[in-house]
Each structure stands twice: as C-alpha cells, then as structure tokens.
C-alpha cells in the first residue's frame, strides 16, 4: 500500500471514529497521535519523500494531524456531555444476568443415544401412528381375538373412528411392534430397523410405572439370522451405552410374536452387581425383552418364513434413563418441573 492509500485509510478511520466513554476517546488519541500512532508514523515517513514532493505531502499530513486532534477533542466533549451515572443505584462491577440455557428432555437425550448406537450398526429409524388398528397392534403379531396373551396388554381402546380397519377396533398402541409390522408389510428383506415412540397402557401411575411411556424396538430380518447374532447385538449395545464392564444375561420368557423368547438382564449399574434395593439384591436389572421372530408373524406380513428368519427386541426408554441418571421416580419425567429439567441443560445429569 503506497503513501496515498495509507493516508486515505487513516482519514476514513478518523471520520468513522466514535466513543462511548473516556477510555474509548483516549484509545483513539493513542492510536492516532501517540508515539507509535498512525498519524505520527506517517509524519516520520515524510523524510523519505522526494524533495520536490515534500511541500505537498507536508501540508497534507499536517492537515491529517489537525483532523485527528480535532476529532479527539470532539469525542472528549461528547463523553463529558453524557449525564453522570447516579451514585449508589448501579453497580458497574456486578456480573450481567445469565440467560437460561435450554436443553432436550432427558428422555429425548436417552432416546437419541439409543438410536445413535443402532444407527451405527446399520439400523434405520421407522415411525408409525400412535392410534393403531387391531391388525397391526395385535392380529399380525400372533394375538388371535381370544388369545390369553391379550390380557398382558392393558389397552386404551378408541371409539368413533371410521375408515379402513375400523371394524377391527382401534386403540392407542401398546407397543411399537406395530411399526415393525408396517415395515415388514411395505418392504422386503433384508430389513434392519428400530422403532422409537410413545406407547400407552392402562396402568396405575406410580414411581415405577406410568400409563404413557417410551419404547425403542428393533427388528432384523434376513436369511440365516441366528439367536447368537441377537445376543451379540444386545451385548454390544449394553457395553456401548453403559461401559465395557457391563454384562448381560438372557432368561427364557414368552412373547406371542417371538419364539424362542427371552428377557434380557444387565449387571446393575448402581451396585456393580453386588446387590442393592434397585436390583432386589440380585445384581441384575431387567432392561428389555427379545427373541426370534415367530414364523407366523413373518407369514402374516408377507415374508416367507421358509426363506427368512429374524430377531426382535424392545426396551423402555424410561427404564434405561433410570439406570443412566439414577432417577428413582418415573413420574419426574412427566411433571415438567424446571428444577428437575434444568439439571440436564448441559447434556449431562449432575447428581
């Protein structure tokens, strides 16, 4: 940048200068007229200008110095004209008020962690309606109309709905397995998906149960899918979420839509397997159900069970959140108490 361009830049900076206080006005003076100020440096360079141009540049630089001093005096006058701050009414050393920081709900945080683990394993995320017809909620999942397994689900039935399937009865879905039925009906294997969402059951609200809660269910259907793959998948999930020291065990159980079926326990995170009131002094906590997809369910969804097999699993998000955050009462997740929710504002629960 030549001398003319530098002078023009300083002139523009002087014209645009402003100050909101005495410190800012003094800073302008030092920047422009101090020992190493921009105008002072330009005046020092006058000796390097050719003799025939010194008179012209000398006049211009003196005008620049005069403009800088005049602007400094104007800034000082502006600051001095400001009304004084009333003594004793404003504490200038007091920290500014902090704006509250928002956060995702703890259930949303846990659901994201769960879906993130399975997404990295190649599972897609599927969604479905919360008001579901009997076929998708029960029938396709191997619940015949008179099957005693229907008594396992305390259902909220819905009246007054018209349209396809209305004759079969409608209800608030009791599990997100209904989403898996829709995925199998609409797609072809290989299928690898998880279905997070709200579910509803007519249960008494207590510290350990609620009439509305969240589930994440998983489904994998392909050729030659084995029970060993199911166990390996769940073991990887638990170790990723709770740490490499966590262990799982599978106990035989019964579900109408899987055969064989199992309940999955994990080593208690509260007592490290030594025994406490949460795990009933067993060292194990039940976290989900699982099993191989019943061939009848595959057939109901249009998939040939002679060619394909699969496994499914389902877990309650509140139960997982309880183990992660050690919150003793599930009702806290639904009361919207800001004192409780603000503990998750930084994304990590502070115990």
Image: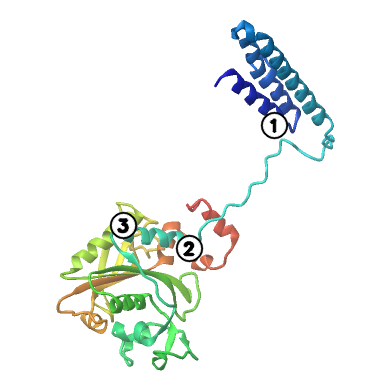
- Residue 104's x, y, as percent? 50, 59
Residue at image mark 1: 16
Q: Quadrant of the N terminus?
A: top right
Drawn side of residue 38 relative to residue 241, left or right = right
Of badges 3 and 1, nearer the viewer stands 1
Picture coordinates of residue 173 (x, y %)? 42, 80
The quarter of the picture where residue 264 lies is: bottom left
* Camera sees residue 310: yes
Q: Secondary structure at mark 1?
A: helix
Whether residues under marks 1 and 2 lie with C-beta atoms below 8 angstroms apart, the answer is no
* Snapshot quadrant of residue 169: bottom left
Q: Earlier in the sequence, mark 3 or mark 1?
A: 1
Mark 3 vs mark 2, CA separation in Å: 30 Å
Which residue has dot 2 on it? 328
Q: CA distance from mark 3 to mark 1?
A: 55 Å
For discs 1 and 2, the disc positioned in front in the rendered view: 1
The residue that mark 3 highlights is 120
Cα–Cα span, label 1 and label 2: 62 Å
Front-lying residue, 40 or 92: 40
């Amino acid at each position: 940048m030549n001398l003319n361009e530098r002078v023009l830049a300083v002139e523009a900076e002087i014209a645009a200068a402003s100050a909101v206080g005495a410190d800012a006005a003094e800073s302008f003076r030092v920047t422009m007229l101090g020992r190493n100020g921009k105008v002072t440096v330009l005046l020092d360079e006058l000796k390097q200008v050719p003799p025939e141009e010194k008179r012209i540049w000398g006049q211009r630089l003196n005008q620049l110095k005069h403009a800088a001093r005049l602007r400094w005096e104007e800034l000082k006058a502006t600051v001095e004209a400001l009304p004084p701050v009333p003594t004793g009414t404003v504490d200038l050393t007091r920290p500014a008020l902090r704006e509250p920081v928002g956060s995702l709900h703890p259930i949303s945080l846990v659901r994201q962690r769960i879906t993130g683990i399975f997404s990295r394993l190649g599972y897609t995320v599927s969604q479905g309606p919360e008001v579901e017809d009997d076929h998708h909620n029960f029938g396709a999942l191997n619940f015949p109309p008179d099957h005693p397994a229907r008594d396992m689900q305390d259902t909220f039935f819905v009246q007054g709905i018209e349209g396809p399937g209305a004759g079969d009865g409608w209800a608030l879905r009791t599990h997100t397995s209904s989403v898996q039925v829709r995925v199998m009906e609409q797609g072809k294997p290989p299928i690898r998906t998880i279905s997070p969402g709200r579910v509803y059951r007519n249960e008494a609200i207590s510290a350990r149960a609620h009439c509305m809660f969240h589930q994440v269910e998983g489904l994998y259907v392909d050729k030659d899918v084995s029970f060993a793959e199911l166990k390996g998948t769940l073991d990887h999930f638990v170790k990723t979420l709770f740490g490499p020291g966590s262990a799982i065990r599978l106990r035989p159980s019964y579900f109408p839509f899987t055969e064989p079926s199992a309940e999955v326990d994990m080593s208690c995170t509260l007592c490290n397997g030594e025994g406490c009131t949460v795990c009933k002094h067993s060292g194990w906590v039940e976290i989900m159900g699982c099993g191989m997809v019943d061939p009848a369910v595959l057939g109901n969804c249009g998939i040939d069970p002679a060619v394909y097999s699969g496994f499914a699993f389902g877990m309650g998000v509140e139960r997982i959140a309880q183990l992660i955050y050690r919150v003793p009462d599930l009702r806290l997740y639904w009361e919207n108490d800001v004192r409780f929710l603000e503990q998750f504002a930084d994304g990590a629960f502070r115990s």
